[in-house]
């Protein structure tokens, strides 16, 4: 239980660090380009701790499930501010906008934005930056998550390595225990294991089986499984010297499983079985370090996989909701909430496995989490970073169009008009998040 809690805590710390780096990816270019940044906060809700450095307040909030930086002038000023500073005269409205709920939301967004402006002539604001600088600032956060994922995958694959079954024999069984029994010890009536009878020993390195050279244990195992009752010549290297042994795999009955390791059943629901060859040898497992480019390659492969899930998010969440109601098994490759990720982290940390295996599992989980943060934030909808990038691109297209036809520069795009769309997106995200959290509590995805 303690190990499970430690795993959850490590995930929360890793998530907070990922969020901190994400916001740092926004903060650094924003300050570099001269934007006035009022706050850099990790988390939401009540402030636990904060300290001001220069013009920016840095701090932590109670709920470490997000973060933000507060930049001056994310949007152009409202007509009220323009009139107050002399940029316009008369005819403006103050207070809440008329026209209903969404119009009020637009006005509230403009009011909140106006509070970050010192004056209409203030140049240290986000909306006055060149388009490319605005895109760099908004890309900085997601790109930081992608870079962190690349580093984590590089540590995992090139630093620790991939757990691989080698051609070295770890152990040799003494006997063949009949299928369907719970015994782990040999009985007098049990036949001697074929590998034991052939004289194979722990530490032997398999060179070839039945005249076929093998580079992996899987290749040797495939030949043995396909040869029940047939004598095979196995060449092994022992203490630097080649030895030949005659191995006759015994036929055993095993269930047929699919690519996920689940039993295959026939039309009547009866598990299917097959006869395979059994030798009684266990492979030695080792970590094989991959080339340095394996980390970036794995990261971008995961980007494609996660993008496929995010693109179908409403459908995937609906399917998850159905499985929650019906009790059906969930798609292991479907979306998870932070609760689900915490459960997986706890399972990894408390697994009955070597410490290195558990460390590798946590690194893989955190790397995948950062890939999800990268992909999700690139969705071109406000309030996500991708939405701000889309607004900047639209502003750039308008300016380029005006320049092409020698027209006056257009006014900056007023993204506050998109607040109703933002509101709908936020409500949808909250609803989908609630479904996933409930599913992760009552019908969780498990590693084991």
Image (spheres, grey):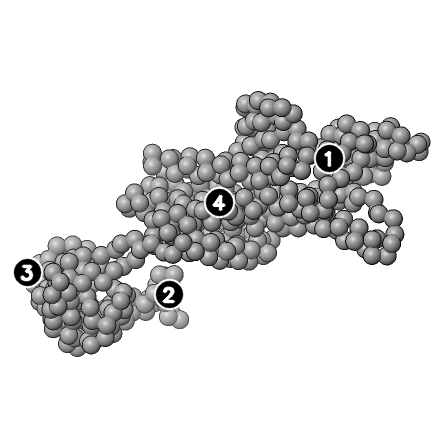
Measured from the top left, where is residue 149 in percent x and y? 48, 47
Q: Determine which residue is flagged by label 1.
A: 125
Disc 2 to disc 1, C-alpha distance? 57 Å
| Residue 357, percent from left and from top | 32, 47
Is residue 117 rendered to the left or right of residue 61? right
Residue pointed to by mark 4: 148
Question: Residue at (57%, 53%) from the top-left corner?
Answer: 310
Q: Can residue 191 be seen from the camera position used here?
A: no
C-alpha separation, residue under disc 4 versus residue under disc 1: 29 Å
Q: Could you tell me how far apart the alpha carbons at marks 3 and 4 are, in whole angstroms?
A: 57 Å
Helix or strand or loop: what does disc 1 sit on? Answer: loop
At a point 15% along the width and 61% down the height, the residue shown is 204
Q: Nearer the viewer, residue 322 or 378?
A: 378
Mark with earlier residue (2, 3): 3
In this rendering, the label closer to the viewer, 4 or 2: 4
Q: Which mark is residue 258?
A: 2
Under circle 3, the secondary element is: loop
Q: Mark 2 and mark 4 in contact (Cβ < 8 Å)?
A: no
Horizontal side of 257 relative to 94 (left or right) equals left
Front one among 32 and 374: 32
Residue 250 placement (x, y as % from top left): 16, 71
Foreground tag (1 vs 3): 1
**Residue at image mark 3:** 188
Dot 4 or dot 2: first in sequence order is 4
For residue 363, above or below residue 121: below
């Amino acid at each position: 239980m303690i190990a499970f809690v430690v795993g959850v805590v490590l995930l929360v710390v890793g998530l907070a660090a990922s969020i901190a780096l994400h916001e740092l990816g926004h903060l650094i270019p924003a300050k570099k380009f001269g934007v006035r940044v009022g706050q850099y906060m990790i988390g939401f809700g009540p402030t636990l701790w904060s300290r001001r450095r220069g013009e920016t307040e840095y701090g932590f909030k109670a709920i470490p499930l997000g973060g933000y930086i507060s930049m001056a002038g994310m949007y152009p000023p409202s007509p009220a501010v323009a009139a107050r500073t002399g940029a316009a005269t008369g005819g403006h409205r103050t207070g809440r906008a008329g026209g209903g709920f969404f119009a009020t939301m637009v006005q509230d967004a403009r009011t909140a934005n106006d509070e970050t402006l010192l004056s209409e002539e203030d140049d240290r604001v986000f909306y006055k930056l060149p388009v490319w600088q605005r895109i760099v600032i908004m890309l900085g956060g997601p790109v930081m998550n992608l870079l962190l994922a690349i580093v984590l995958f590089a540590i995992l694959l090139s630093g620790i390595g991939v757990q691989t079954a080698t051609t070295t024999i770890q152990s040799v069984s003494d006997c063949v225990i009949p299928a369907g029994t719970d015994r782990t010890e040999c009985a007098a009536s049990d036949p001697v294991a074929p590998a034991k009878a052939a004289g194979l020993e722990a530490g032997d390195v398999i060179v070839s089986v039945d005249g076929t050279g093998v580079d992996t244990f899987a290749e040797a195992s495939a030949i043995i499984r396909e040869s029940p009752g047939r004598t095979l010549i196995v060449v092994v290297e022992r203490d630097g010297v080649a030895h030949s042994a005659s191995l006759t795999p015994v036929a055993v009955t095993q269930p047929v499983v699919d690519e996920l390791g689940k039993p295959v059943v026939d039309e009547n629901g009866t598990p299917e079985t097959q006869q395979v060859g059994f030798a009684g040898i266990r492979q030695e497992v080792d970590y094989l370090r991959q080339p340095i480019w394996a980390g970036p390659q794995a990261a971008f492969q995961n980007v494609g996989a996660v993008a496929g899930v995010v693109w179908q998010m409403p459908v995937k969440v609906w399917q998850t909701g159905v499985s929650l109601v019906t009790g059906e098994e969930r798609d292991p490759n479907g979306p998870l909430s932070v609760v689900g990720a915490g459960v997986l982290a706890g399972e990894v940390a408390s697994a009955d496995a070597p410490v290195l295996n558990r460390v590798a599992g946590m690194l893989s989980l955190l790397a995948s989490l950062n890939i999800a943060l990268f992909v999700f934030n690139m969705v071109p909808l406000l309030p996500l970073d991708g939405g701000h990038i889309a607004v900047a691109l639209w502003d750039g297209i308008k300016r380029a169009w005006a320049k092409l036809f020698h027209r006056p520069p257009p006014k900056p795009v007023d993204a506050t008009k998109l607040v109703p769309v933002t509101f709908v997106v936020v409500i949808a995200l909250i609803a989908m998040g609630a479904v996933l959290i409930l599913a992760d509590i009552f019908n969780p995805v498990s590693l084991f």
